[in-house]
Amino acid sequence: MPDVATRGLISKDHLEQFKKILGDSYVLADEDNLQHYGHDETEHLLYLPEVVLKPQTTAEIAAIMKICNAAKIPVTPRGAGTGLSGGALPHLGGVLLSSERMNRIIEIDERNLQVTTEPGVITEVLQNAVKEKGLFYPPDPSSRGSCFIGGNIAENSGGPKAVKYGVVRDYVLNLEVVLPSGEIIWTGANVLKNSTGYNLTQLIVGSEGTLGIVTKIVLKLIPLPAYDLLMLAPFASLEKASEAVSAIFRAGFVPSALELVEIDALKIVSKMVDSSAVPVNDEIEAHLIIEVDGNNMDILMGEMEAIANLLTQFDAGEIFFADNAQQKDELWKLRRRVAEAAKNSGYTIEEDTVVPRAELPALIRGVKELGKKHGFEVVCYGHAGDGNLHIRINHPTIKNSHGNKEMTDALTELFILVKKLGGTISGEHGIGLIQKPYLDTVFTEANLRLMQGIKKTFDPNNILNAGKIFDLPK
């Protein structure tokens, strides 16, 4: 539960002010709602807010922030609650500010290949809406069917398509933001080039709701590729599979997705979704899911054939080519639900490491060795094409890494290895609450001082998602 000192800051008068702004129906303090909004998908953690507020407009958020800033009431912004680093956990109590009612796609600008949206739009809904216009918004986190675009902005999300098309940051042109003071700003302009002052847009992207609350988003779009092809390649060795990843790029291919799934993870998710789409046997340690896309089918077929031939150098087994949309959907469903299935099977601790893709074999070896050393089981999967490996841990007695010294010590060893390999401790899930202890593994004191200074400039009273990324000032 939150620190005692943070409880009771919200008075009856504050609640009446909130109700005046939002109406009674959108100011919630009953036990069921506090429980629901007290957790996200991070481990098994629960922190109850004192009140849940559901605004629908920028002006309402601005009015709420003015009240909270004056009274120094903690505010935790929340999207869909699909985060894995504790970014939406109201660990200080206070106000939980949900963006779920801000769910309009405001405009799809086909002339300029842009879309303007509110933050509470589900990512897949936005993708489908622009797809109907022949346009493409590539970032596609595994939770795209439930996560909000605003949460994707907060975490700078990626997903399978990042290997070819980049992450959220590469598509954000402009943001409307409510500052902790209640002031409203636009961070940039709706243009493709902008060298006018500091880049506040890119500063907000990935800031995990600690600097401001995003209320409108302008995204760049691209034309939708006409075709995509998908293959599944099995490997008897997890290391051979990861070695093949680097070889594909060195040979000059740029897949639109290149995912690695360890066989133990595949067994877990296949059982959960009752699927036999992928043959599971003890001779296989890992699979690569490889997708290419473009506008010329003959070229794509040639690329797939060449990649398949290349994989034979790494002891790949019989390669499965998805022949139709149903088979493709089945394979992607398995990949996208791995995290959920693993968590339900006891793998409650997830790390979001990223290294240069050629270092994946060394990272996987190190992960397995750490599991043996510290007595936990581990499964690996993730966006191998950009070196982003998700590591799920099942410890027999420890289900939360947050606040547990034994697990923190083990993870520190992992992140020291990641740093040694030229990587960093989060590729797309963010730092939030649970990754804070490891920041000094990858950052110098000067790095941290500059970031903390930025936070203080935006939020001098330290009310907005305080205690995330950095500890509270002592």
Image (tube, grey):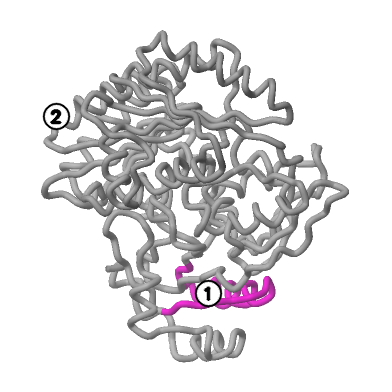
Disc 1 packing (10 Å; few <14; some 14–19; many ≥20): many
Q: Earlier in the sequence, mark 2 or mark 1?
A: 1
Which segment did they paint magenta? 51-75
Residue underneath mark 2: 372
Residue for point 59% across, 73% down: 101
Residue situated in front as seen by the camera: 463 or 83: 83
State the image coordinates of residue 52 (x, y, percent, origin top left): 46, 77
Q: Residue, x 37% and y 73% (percent of image)?
A: 36
Q: Secondary structure at mark 2?
A: helix
The reply to whether the magenta stretch includes residue 64 is: yes
Q: Residue 430 placed where, x, y %?
A: 45, 45
Circle nearer the viewer, 2 or 1:
2
**Rendered residue at 34%/72% (across/down):** 48
Residue 443 visible in the displayed image: no
Q: Residue at x 80, y 37 (%)?
A: 195
Q: Position of residue 89 (x, y in %)?
A: 39, 62
- Judge whether 22 appears above or below 316 on screen: below
- Give the labeled residue for mark 1: 68
Q: Can residue 279 be seen by looking at this rendering? A: yes
Task: Look at the image and tell me in which quarter the C terminus lies.
Answer: bottom left
Is residue 326 inside the magenta stretch?
no
Which amino acid type corresponds to the residue marked 1 in the rendered image? Cys
Q: Quadrant of the N terminus?
A: bottom left
Question: Is 70 left or right of 59, judged from the image as shown?
Answer: left
Query: In the rendered view, would you say 252 is above or below 157?
Result: above
